[in-house]
Image: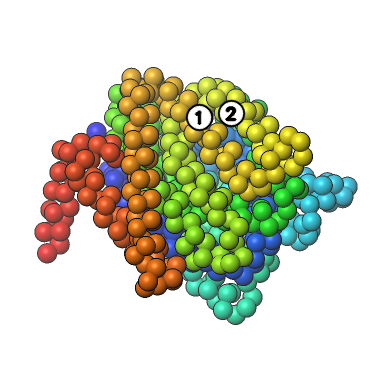
Amino acid sequence: MIHSHNKEDSLNRRYFFKLISNFAMLLSGVVTMILVPRSLGPAQYGNFSFLTDFFQRVTNSLGMGTSAAFFTKISQRQNEHKILIFYTYFTCVVIVVVAVFIAVCLYTDIHNAIWPDQKTPFILMAAVWAVLTWNLQNLNKVTDAYGLTVKAEKAQILQRLIAVCLIVSFFFSGRLHIGTLFIYHYLIMGVLHAFWICILFRSRPTLLHDLQKDFRLKKEELKLYYREFYDYCHPIIVMTFIGLFVGIFDRWLLQNYAGSVQQGFYSLSQRIGMLCFMFTSAMTPLITREFSVAFAENNIRHMGELFRKYIPLLYSLSAYFSCFLLFQADNLIQIIGGEEFQGAKMAVMIMAVYPIHQTYGQLSGSVFFATERTDLYRNITLIFLMIGLPITYILITPGAFGYNAGAVGLAVKMVCIQFFAVNVQLYYNTKLMNLNFWYYFFHQISCLSVFLLIAYGVSWGGEIIFKPFTETALIKFLVSGLIYTIFIGVLIKINPKIIGISQKQLNDFYAKMKTKVSIRK
């Protein structure tokens, strides 16, 4: 049974609104992806992605895993507003450290080595972008922890509509370039900050007064919270900074040896992959919250029920999108980037697979944080980070030991390392919850294989059928998607186990949908 409070929405309802919000984000993201790469071109698009990726990694690493600790603890102790105050202090420290780091780099001229061929104004703008993004993610954790997901997601849907209007106006006015792209992000993040803060204070009328009253924490309270967060996070602090180095090193090698165009190709493939992940990522904070509550009550059995119910299903959902996009890479690039991005085809095909196991990584990783086994999570992650480091060098660099594979090389490394790392995490989590590891492992293989086969058949058949009638990429993409969805739907009807559910669960779902439709009539 899902734990809930009277004033909170059920898990299914919260997920529904997360899903609707992510669908709005998907539509907004598609519009942005069509307009931005075409306006900027591969080189400038690569520069934007290189800088924003760098500073996003820096801010996340300076967070040292505290975001997960913050979410876990505020989910468990929702009336303890001083946790919010302490984390506000910590956020200010992160901002100061980022500012000092940039100042030192610019003053000593080492910025040319760290950010090759990048202009100073864009470096500064990327840093501001990363800080706003990180703070927005933490604010979203607060709304989820307080059970305000539905209201927060409604606000995000409105924000995405505003975002589409803004980006379209920039594009058609001929003012969409790297500078205005940063301004666009500032505006839409500012709007969402305002929406969520209003929701937070309206839903908890005494919160603002409590925060103002206790904003100056006592020295003893600071020490207490510091120790609590440190005990939670210290196992992953080393991992966080090694992850920072490895992540930056990957993109820096690509920028330094392959150039901005290859960086643009990889960035486009990464963004397309992220579209597949939007639907499953909606569930991650909600499941993490439920895991945290169940673990606080020492209810391992309930954790296992949640894992068994949601993880295979969400993996299958991610595989459904990814397998289709893999074989639609040609059409997708024509729609999004145009002829300038044709060189990104292979990278797009490979990175389309990345979100499939990213789903397992996010949801399985949430179990480690909810159960406070951050030391084990650190050890697994560190091993695969270190394995990936030489692989990146070999695949990207030219010379006797290098393959000079550019964006394709980095994409191959990311997918392979993630597959093995995620399954090691899965092994330890199934062991904790007394679940069968091999069931989940073979479900990955069987589901992926069948979906790939159907996606390939639809793509191959589509090329033959469409050739005499149309060469329009969008029409081919949409019609192929419809046919692919019909085949997948028939498959699920015949054998629902392919997506990790039983025939009874499927029948119950149909019955529930019929009831809702009849009520509306």
Pick the quarter of the image with the N terminus.
top left
Tell which of 516 and 482 is nearer to you.
482
In the rendered image, residue 464, in percent from the top left (x then y), is placed at: 37, 62
Direction from residue 125 to residue 354 in the image, left or right: left
Tell which of 232 and 396 is nearer to you.
396
For label 1, the residue is 420
* Numbered label attached to residue 384: 2
Q: How many marks are shown on the rendered structure?
A: 2
> In which quarter of the view is residue 86 placed?
top right
Going by the picture, which residue comes out furthest to the bottom? 173
In the rendered image, residue 286, in percent from the top left (x then y), is placed at: 38, 41
Label 2 packing within 10 angstroms: few (<14), some (14-19), many (20+): some
Q: Amino acid at mark 1?
A: Phe
Disc 2 + disc 1, Cβ < 8 Å: yes
In the rendered image, residue 407, in percent from the top left (x then y), is placed at: 63, 48
Label 2, label 1: how many angstroms apart (C-alpha)? 8 Å
In the rendered image, residue 147, in percent from the top left (x then y), is placed at: 37, 45
Q: Residue at x 44, y 57 (%)?
A: 328
Here the colouring is rainbow
Q: Residue at x 48, y 31 (%)?
A: 422
